[in-house]
Image (cartoon, rainbow, N blue to C red):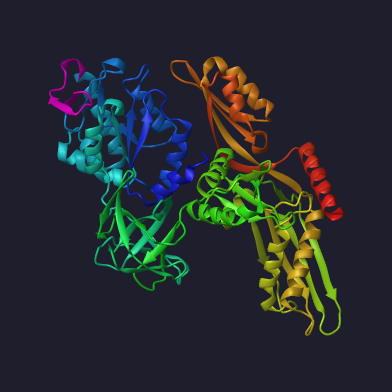
Amino acid sequence: VDFTIEVERALRVLDGGILVLCGVAGVQSQSLTVDRQMKRYNVPRLAFVNKLDRQGSNPWKVIDDLRNQLKLNAAAVQIPIGLEDEHKGVVDLVEMKSLIFEGEKGEDIVTGEIPEDMMEIVEEKRNEMIEILADADDDIAELFLMEETPDMETLKAAIRKQTVACKFVPVFMGSAFKNKGVQPLLDGVVSYLPSPKEKENFALDTKNNEEKVPVTCDDNDSLLALAFKLEETPFGQLTYMRVYQGMLKKGNTITNVNDGKKVKLARIVRMHSDDMEDITEAGSGEVVAMFGIDCRSMDTFSDGATNIALSSMFIPEPVMSIAVKPKTNQMQNNFTKALTKFTKEDPTLRVRVDGESQETILSGMGELHLEVYTERMSREYNVEVVTGQPSVNYKETINSRQEFDWLHKKQTGGSGQYARVIGYIEPMNESDMLESGKTVEFKNNCVGTNIPPEYYTSCDKGLGDAVTEGALVGCEVEGVRVVLEDGASHAVDSSDMAFRICMANAVRDAMKKADPSVLEPVMTVEVDAPTEFQGSVVAGLNKRMGLIMNSDMNDDGSGVKVIAEVPLANMFGYSTELRSCTQGKGEFTMEYFKHVATNKNVQEELMAKYKEEREAKEAA
């Protein structure tokens, strides 16, 4: 989960994918995360059930998991010939032939007739495939209802059409270890996944309220490309780019739509794993890399001035922070360079300077994520970093409606400051926040010109100032709607600043009286461990104030999957504890779920700690 952004950025630019699943474990916790990401970007996929040569493999359980847990319309297009140590090939249910993989690495494929003893299961699974495909495809449904058998070409065309439309998932079988089933899987990529021209992609018109504009994927149109990944190499920054339309040509000048900077293409390479092949041009639909481009991740490039930009990807909020500083002042320059470079590469890594403590705060997706970047600073930039205890991103909210009537009046020599705001604040529930897309909402219900309209934006900015720091523990405030109903102004003394200060003070005062509470991030934790350690795992999660949501045993009873919701503050050091109590056999993943109200005693501890820190700063 710490590096989920790497999967996210790949799926943002891909037109199709293969979801690889373990033939023994089936759908695992990370499979659920990847499935969510694939659905977010409408990526058509094939599924590949791997490791069928392992003890306890069961492809039919995996297909049931795909249907029940991932809610996919999935069906096998192959069935294995033998399982575990007897696995030697597959039967193709579309072309109705057997494929036996021979040779040391399965490189020799022997095509033949379907074994007699398998005909019954082949007929059963082929009919099941046609029935499930009929749920998505009208032509197949018509043949199915008329009890006719579709021919091979009709079947292939229907599978391709519904796979591209994300309404059907063909499931392939095999074992990648000896390349069993890999060649027909790659044939399946060609047969069933879309070409770049078949996949609908959209750009956003920034001048027209971000209206969607279809991308043509034509080499003759104007260039539109997305820089989706940056990598530091001995030759400088390597920028990976997906070309959506137009051509990239060596020597041409391209423009960064986000900041307007122009850059000449000095070198374009096609990547083959870690080998680079120099090329002179790249067309629509290609993924290439280039040197000498200074940009951020998810910048759009064009071949001239344009107001069309490609949409970015979903970036999860960071859930863990540490205070970092270089060991000596001499390292400060390299320290700053490293942070600038890392935040360009990885959008989930955030850097900010705490306004009060002046500490540099590094926020990321987990302990391992932050550990890797501090290690990279030492290795790549020779900066030894001193880190503080990771702090959890607590938030604050209110639980009741509170009216306010605040007057801000300040008279000094010359024109003073005068502003008055009247209204109320109220809590927002989850559905309100999802609907508005904001965690804090400003609503203007003013009638008349008691507050001149030009000051409404100042009031909104004042609300922004107020919610950056709550009254209880100084954390960001969310789930608050502020409704402005009336106010007053002065012809001479009223100003943008006066209304901004007035609104900020009014909201801060109202929040103190609106039954405020502290919210803490809660993670969805999935633990996989052998069954004999189930008691220890559940006890460990309970000890960390976890709420057990589900506990499932796998088919043969050898392993257990426990799903729980646990406050992030209680998850530090859990990986070590889990390994200790499961003899190193347990593993877990966690993902941010939501912020929920803390217990009263935790809230009081946090408030006492915050009060001590403030008093210490004031004394200093």
Q: With respect to residue 121, does 139 lie above or below? A: below
Q: Number of callouts in the render? A: 0
Drawn side of residue 117 relative to residue 479, left or right: left
Q: In which quarter of the image is residue 252?
A: bottom left
Q: Where is residue 235 in the image (x, y as percent from the top left)?
A: 39, 54
Give 182 or 103, whichever is nearer the viewer.
103
Give 342 or 157, whichever is nearer the viewer.
342
Magenta-colored span: 98-118
Drawn side of residue 560 relative to residue 356, left or right: left
Drawn side of residue 10 relative to residue 246, left or right: right
Q: Position of residue 204 (x, y in %)?
A: 42, 64
Q: With respect to residue 408, does 30 lie above or below? A: above
Q: In which quarter of the image is residue 306?
A: bottom left
Outermost residue toward the left in this view: 112
> Can you say which quadrant of the picture contains the C terminus?
bottom right
Q: Position of residue 304 (x, y in %)?
A: 36, 72
Tell me what residue is drawn at x 68 percent, y 63 percent. 464
Tell me what residue is drawn at x 25 percent, y 60 percent. 281
Q: With respect to residue 458, does 578 lie above or below? A: above
Q: With respect to residue 550, does 489 lie above or below? A: below
Q: Would residue 439 be seen by someone viewing this image from the given angle?
A: no
Q: Would residue 186 be seen by someone viewing this image from the given angle?
A: yes
Outermost residue toward the front in this view: 330
Q: Position of residue 397 (x, y in %)?
A: 72, 50
105 inside magenta stretch = yes
480 inside magenta stretch = no
Tell me what residue is drawn at x 32 percent, y 47 percent. 165
Drawn side of residue 146 relative to residue 260, left or right: left
